[in-house]
Image (spheres, rainbow, N blue to C red):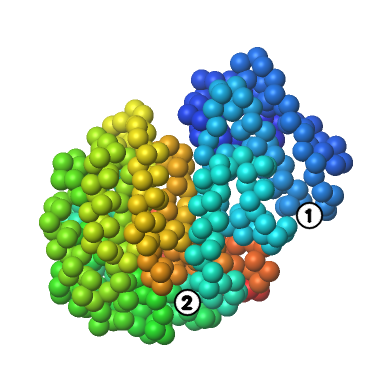
Amino acid sequence: MIETPLTGFESDLREVATAFGVDDSLRIKHLFKESPDRLINTFVINGQSYAYGNLIPETNDQIVKKRLIKRYAKLSLYKALSRSLGKELPWGALTGIRPTKLAYSQIEETGEFIDFFQSVMKVSEEKTSLVKKILETQKGLYEKNNLNTDLFVFIPFCPTRCKYCSFISQDIKSARGKVDEYVETLVKEINESAQLIKKLRSIYIGGGTPVSLNIAQLDKVLCAIDKINSGVEYTVEAGRPDVITEENLKLLKEHGVTRVCVNPQTFNQKTLDLIGRNHTESQTIEKYHLAKKYFDVNMDLIAGLPEEDFNDFKYSLDKTISLKPDDITVHTLCLKKGSYLTQSTSRLSVNEIDEMVNYAHKTLGENDYRPYYLYRQKYAAGNLENTGYALKGKECVYNIDAMEETTSVVACGANAISKVVTSNFERIERYASPKDVLSYLGKIDTIIQKKKELFLEREI
């Protein structure tokens, strides 16, 4: 339990405690004092006090000031817990989703980020080096242009629900009565959204599993996007090998798709059965080669899946590298509310997770894959990161845009979040569509109007 005098900061401080594996049974009291040029944060843990002072620049910008107060409160708690527990974390006091975005911000302010990461935020040399490599890979791809817009389309249906999944998705068989109406409504939203796009940079159809739609349904969605597409990078999360077919791949190719995701998550059959993936290792290989005839291919793996050890993960990674996909993303298992595994598992095992992630970074580098985007999630195994690696020239621009938030996003579908990046890049304004399909269907006219207000009635 954390007691703090800073209103609204409880969840932020709890993130730091959670990263250390601390739960609410540990009582932490926070004392805060502010002077014109200094912040003093004191944390009392198990009766021991830990006090830290930080100088702050003079500013009349209350948003900047609140951000600094939050940053130094979290940093002070990190230092206090690190001393109390005798433990350091690889990402130090950083709890945000986008470390690379923070690095870019520091470079704009001071010309560099490494000293800030290591000396101030206590990030390890290894993770700082990873961020540095990603920024180097992004040269020529990272672009701050307030005219740029990505189109995101969400298909919330899957052939089955994986046991680790917490996304708002539905088994397409049980949702069959809603699918046609969803497609028609989605097409209407895509058509109405065309006017919101200034300079199209990329298209991404995610899910769920978009190719779980039948050919006629998928064609309707793709035809609507055809009216917007100007020949940009165009990615579809084909995802599950059990629903990838020659027919739906040809359809995607006919509509200008340039990249698909074929996601094994693991090549160990016992794990596939355990987590509810209705495909085999041989199916994944077969569908990968089928997709590679037409597209650049992304593949995803998850480190830390239930009952897998280092050798299991090593087998999956080595098998993936042997196929030579264009892009490999290594996720660390993240169990959020709503997943079957969260409900059935009292604690996430992180045995050997560091070894898995380190092996991935080393081995992918040795095989010409360069890290090019990164993000972190709450409740990730080992408090680690998800990192995308690609062969040179095969990086997915949409992934970079999504992580660095340099591009506005016109998002269509249930649970889709549209974003407007303001002209000075200092603020992002959002509109989130309802998460569940029925609410989305019933409120589509309101959704379209709200998006128009977001994009057309505000200065971008």
The answer to whether 399 is drawn above or below residue 22 in the figure is below
Q: Judging from the image, what secondary structure is the residue with disc 2 in?
A: strand
Please state which amino acid type lies under the numbered disc 1.
Asp
Q: Is 79 placed left or right of 160 in the picture? A: right
Name the one closer to the observer, 106 or 398: 106
How far is mark 2 from mark 1, CA to CA? 33 Å
Q: Mark 2 highlights which residue?
A: 201
Q: Mark 1 highlights which residue?
A: 61
The spot of residue 407 in percent (x, y) is 54, 69
Which quadrant of the figure contains the C terminus? bottom right
Q: Residues within 10 Å of mark 1 (few under 14, many from 20)?
A: few
The spot of residue 447 in percent (x, y) is 46, 66
Number of numbered discs: 2
The answer to whether 257 is drawn above or below residue 411 in the figure is below
Q: Is 107 placed left or right of 407 in the picture? A: right
The spot of residue 387 in percent (x, y) is 42, 53
Identify the residue at horizontal 17%, vertical 60% (top origin): 285
The spot of residue 119 in percent (x, y) is 67, 42
Which quadrant of the figure contains the N terminus? top right
